Image (tube, rainbow, N blue to C red):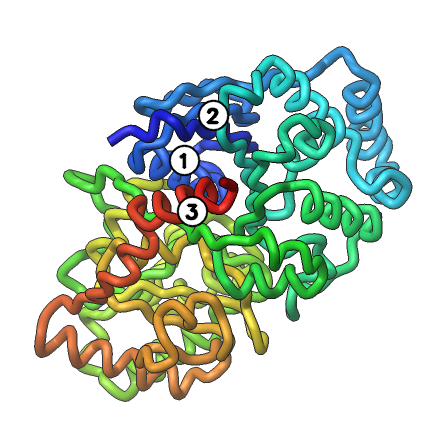
Amino acid sequence: MKNKSFNILVVVESVDVEGSSGAKANLALINNLKTAGFGIEVLHYTRKEIILSGISTTVIKEKRRSLFFMLSRLEAFLRTRLKLPLNREVEKLVGFSFTLLNDRNSIISCLRRKNPEEFDLVMTLSQGGSFRPHHALLKLPEWHSKWLAYIHDPYPMRHFPPPYTWTEPGSEKKEFFVRQVSEKAAFSAFPGELLLEWMGQFHPQFLKTGIVIPHQISDHDITNKKLPELFNPVNFNIVHAGNLLWGRDPGGLIEGFKGFLRHCPEAKQKSRLIFIGGKNHYSKFLMEVSQKHSEVCLIEENIPFDLVASIQNLSSVNVILEGKSELSPFLPGKFPHCVAANRPILLLGPPVSESRRLLGSEYPFWEEIDRPNKIALLIEQLYDKWKHQGVSKLDRQDLEYYLSYKNLKEVILSLKKNDQ
């Protein structure tokens, strides 16, 4: 049933399903808003035409006759051709790059052609450390009373927990930007409770306006996909899909897998540890390991997202790998994909994390990333279940609902009730 009285304008940087994990998460959210029955219009800065079924989309055109555009091209020329790294100095002085400021103004120009009275909510979606739509909305006070600012990750980088903490150029100005967002937006949203609480300690207004909108499960065509030769669905396949950013060290997982094979040599012929994702900080290490150990497989070529989802659905175990820390407030973009695959999840990360909070402290297949002996024991348990019972199921209907359009609909409609 269509919620004709609740129309949402979504302003987002990218809706390219083959782009970053943030773009995938944003696209899943947009599609589930439509599935929930809301009226949806999307303004996006993907730089190419994207067709979303049943959703009105508009590509935001870049302003190419502006001072910021000229300055951004000059800075890029000096950096790439003359090797003068002025971008850090620009950010120290201004807080943000000339490119970001030009993109912000491009989004503002597009938004000014929209009538705020036609929408009940305007939702700005972040993507990693990029908040271009939020920068634009700050300059448009006529939208603030119906503005929902989605915060995907901690920001600025100095608010990341270890091992990711880093003070960027212009950090104070970036901090002031987030404070403005917390004070001007009528609502704020975060993918997890821990991130809301984490950002709330720096900007208490988030604790008053914040809600949780987790990354969403959405439908993908995973039928009749030609599988890579390295993946044989009859094997005991442990799959890690997604880029290994610095800090997500796969060494403990690999050593744990090798320890499992030493303890269960009969499993060697049928067991595979498979990494899927583009080149990353650990690519050289993974290549060296895969060349020495044929049971460790590496798929680095770009393969369509639907094929990755198909592999996850046919795996024996899906891995979520996080950094070595005491706390991880992030909800990984791959978390809903792993829940939707309905296979056991091997969660390797901090003792306090959003993923572990959702799976539950009693979830058996969790360990910290640098404990290979214990990881080996968990893999052996998963293997024994697979060997004696066949393919295991995660079977978490509570999480399937939590990550679904049904829960999303209730959360969005609660905003309307609270605003009355």
Earlier along the polypeptide chain: callout 3 or callout 1?
1
Counting from the top left corner in percent of width and height, residue 38 is at 36, 31
In-front residue for pair 4/371: 4
Mark 1 falls on what kind of element? helix
Which residue is disc 2 drawn over?
Answer: 42
Residue 291 sits above or below residue 405 on the image: below
- For the residues labelled 2 and 3, the Cα–Cα distance comes to 22 Å
Which residue is disc 3 drawn over?
Answer: 414
Q: Residue at x 76, y 44 (%)?
A: 177
Which kind of residue does numbered mark 3 sit on?
Ser
Q: Residue at x 49, y 67 (%)?
A: 322
In-front residue for pair 163/42: 42
Q: Is residue 272 visible?
A: no
Q: Quadrant of residue 372?
A: bottom left
Which quarter of the figure is the N terminus placed in? top left
Q: Residue at x 79, y 30 (%)?
A: 98
Which residue is disc 1 drawn over?
Answer: 30
In-front residue for pair 152/309: 152
Q: Are marks 3 and 1 in contact (CB under 8 Å)?
A: no
Q: Characterize the local packing of mark 2: few (<14), some (14-19) or many (20 or more) Cα atoms within 10 angstroms.
A: many
Q: Quadrant of residue 50?
A: top left
